[in-house]
Amino acid sequence: MNQTLRFTLLLLLFTSVFSWKKDEFRNCNQTPFCKRARSRSPGSSDLIATQITVTDGDLTANLIPKSQPDSKPLILTLSVHHDGILRLKIDEDHHSSHNHPKKRFQVPDVVVETFAATKLWLQRLTSEDAASSVYLSDGYSAVIRHDPFELFIRDDNSGDRVISLNSHGLFDFEQLREKNEDDNWAESFRTHTDKRPYGPQSISFDVSFYDADFVYGIPERATSLALKPTRGPNVEESEPYRLFNLDVFEYIHDSPFGLYGSIPFMLSHGKVRGTSGFFWLNAAEMQIDVLGSGWDAESGISLPSSQNRIDTMWMSEAGVVDAFFFVGPRPKDVLRQYAAVTGASALPQMFAVAYHQCRWNYRDEEDVENVDAKFDEFDIPYDVLWLDIEHTDGKRYFTWDRTLFPNPEEMQRKLAGKGRHMVTIADPHIKRDENYYLHKEASEKGYYVKDSSGNDFDGWCWPGSSSYPDTLNPEIRSWWADKFSYQSYVGSTPSLYIWNDMNEPSVFNGPEVTMPRDAIHYGGVEHRELHNAYGYYFHMATAEGLVKRGEGKDRPFVLSRALFAGSQRYGAIWTGDNSADWDHLRVSVPMVLTLGLTGMSFSGADVGGFFGNPEPELLVRWYQLGAYYPFFRAHAHHDTKRREPWLFGERKTELIRDAIHVRYALLPYYYTLFREANTTGVPVARPLWMEFPSDEATFSNDEAFMVGNSILVQGIYTERAKHASVYLPGKQPWYDLRTGTVYKGGVTHKLEVTEESIPAFQRAGTILTRKDRFRRSSTQMANDPFTLVIALNSSQAAEGELYIDDGSSFGFLEGAFIHRRFVFANGKLTSVDVAPTSGGNVRHKSDVVIERIILLGQAPGSKHALIEPSNQKIDLELGPLWVQRARSPLFTTIRKPNVRVAEDWTIKIL
């Protein structure tokens, strides 16, 4: 192909890719498995469960159609695990005489290794004529109805149902078949045709959540936190929620359309029963309907329960049933149970929790140096500077454009001298250039994904003609990981970390801008079977590469765009190519909250919007909100105007600086929350109902969110706003984070809005840890003293926690950390060690002190404080809530108690 024709083709491809065009993506009617599943009527499944027994500690059964008793059965396996987790597997019978030459794909490396050890070995089952049941956990049983087949979890105390599968008889499992000359299983969309060598192999079934008011989860899409019905009476015509990882350029908000990641995990929540969850481990395309009340009114099926419920319909192109049921009953219970299966979030390095500055692209070393210097000139801290694809030699990853970046090591060392880091991009598309060492090596070793004919798959992406490593293969993941060594990645240093983009995988000339479904992976797996997990394996390999590079001593930081269940174990993700408009600012909150609910705690949206040029007011509001995201990064498209924080006039610079300073002050609190996510699966950013699970006013509120259990944040989503309505849940008061003003709980407040900040509040009864001395970076704050902000409740009590380690290594796994709980009660503040005594022989040491304790809501009359065990008596005084802010309100303060954060002590108010 000559260069002119090649360039013309690329222009055409880019034009079609780089704008939202609905007809470029399949809808349900254009997706045969979805269309078939949606056309089925309730009761269409006539499966019955037979030969039910206990085998190797599991309940097993055969599922056969009642109308075809001689047909090949499906094999059901039910496993019970600790903490109320039920695992259901349904697959073809691979031991029968009808063996098919291909086995259905079961997703490996997602369920954590420790999960197998949590299995409870069943000794017996309770059988009646119509059903069999097994113990699940205290108060719960799993019940299989035999004819027709149904599975449900029962609350044994009340007899009520919690979750059920196939209650509406919609289960369908298309078994693999041998092709004959009359079969035409190919599927076409627009100009692309996929071969179907094993025939249709879809699975669909209904799942019901009982006593649920709302359902949530199944990211990733730009829509409300509470999932709206997609089918049923009085439901506006809608597509199902689609889970199919796609490179969607300029995505639209308020749409069920799937984006860059897929996590097939749904939670329900209601005032009566609490929270439950359902997770289907399947990496093929999935479509999910949330069914509106009355959708089955004409079916004639009468469920044996008068409970309210939300019905859903799950449809997948391929795979097996490998499903997990979580009984809760509290929100944090479900997240802990899900984390027991897929893993909790990795603990990031401290620098990664701070502010990141990115643009496509910082042009050259001089540009990098100037941007870095301007942050110092304007007294704005930041920790990470990012380089997009243009820093490479012709989009060849692990290389540098030596004209623009002649001295990359020195550039990184200059940043590191200020405690700062750099991130560069490494995408999965490898330029097909025989002079490019990476391509040559991958090609020679046979490490690329193959097309349906068995040749290396050749698609188009940023470098032009490209191929893609088959990271499903552990050997190829290890090979990719080795490329991050300092010897292989020439020009990299220990302060350089990685960004994986386009790993859906994005293929500009592929169907729906992705890889064809009939491409072939390791073990003969079709791409259709693992599509949603491709980016997950690539993310995994990259993270393992950074661990290898650091000889197992340095925690990796890898940002990924594509995600799947388990991605939380390998790094952060962001919400992709958003736009600089108020609607995208607004929808960023439910997007981040949904990701947190499904395991991905370390997430955020591009501050300012990737596309377009934000008006200064929008940019300021985005910084003020983004400072509370778990992942805090500004980013912009190369066609946008430069928008570094100092380019919008002195006042706007001041407001952005102040927003970033808030994040840096709260870094100790955020880091403690990331440790909580790392140990429990509970996210950093939380829906209000997670902390107030009985308050119905919080169930569909996704304009506000909790940061941990202590801070409530309400964004401002309209320009020139003068007022904001903020609902503050609970019976206890709230304190304005900026002014300390007290507001009553359980009330919606109409608040005046100023340009200075967005509404944010500290919950009464909590203690926040801050660092109030602002440096160039978080690294330079490591030995700075702490401030405690104690927000007293109506009982004059409060508590909070602080977690500290070295901020970078894996030493915390050996017990090298400090974990304190601060408790204020009966006029006394106590510091208690809550680190486990059996954590290991290594301990983290710190001489850092607490330099200021601020009391909000302190009853008048006290004048002194007694510090023990030093027996030091000091005067209480009035001090500013924020030392660095002019005109900050004054509150009762214990200044310079100088107690060490690592030690036990008490401070008694006299």
Image: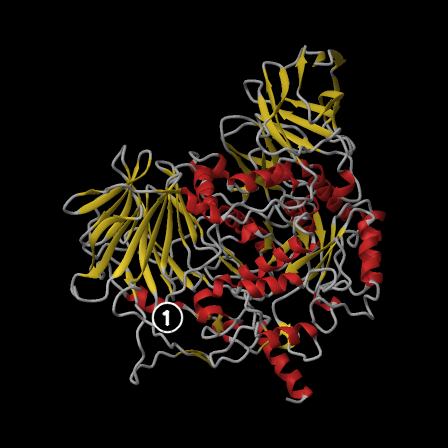
Q: Quadrant of the N terminus?
A: bottom right
Count neighbours of disc 1 (C-alpha within 10 A) and say few if under 14, some if 14 to 19, many if 20 or more. Answer: some
The answer to whether residue 232 shows anywhere in this view is no
Relative to 178, 684 lies left or right:
right
Residue depicted at 43% across the width and 64% down the height = 284
Residue depicted at 31% across the width and 48% down the height = 56
Q: Amino acid at mark 1?
A: Lys
Answer above or below: position of 319 versus 101: above
Q: Quadrant of the C terminus?
A: top right
Q: Nearer the viewer, residue 460 or 18?
A: 460
Answer above or below: position of 263 versus 22: above
Q: Where is residue 892 drawn, in percent x and y?
A: 70, 20
Answer above or below: position of 779 versus 311: above
Q: Where is residue 701 drawn, in percent x and y?
A: 49, 43
Q: Which residue is mark 1?
A: 102
Which residue, as the protein is rendered here, is positioned at the far bottom?
Answer: 2
Q: Under tag 1, what secondary structure?
A: loop
Answer above or below: position of 594 versus 26: above
Count of labels in the image: 1
Q: Nearer the viewer, residue 824 or 749?
A: 824
Q: Where is residue 906 drawn, in percent x and y?
A: 66, 17
Give the image's coloring scheme.
secondary structure
The answer to whether residue 207 shows anywhere in this view is yes
Relative to 244, 172 lies left or right:
left
Q: Where is residue 745 drawn, in percent x and y?
A: 52, 29
Q: Nearer the viewer, residue 153 or 94?
A: 94
Relative to 154, 470 lies left or right:
right
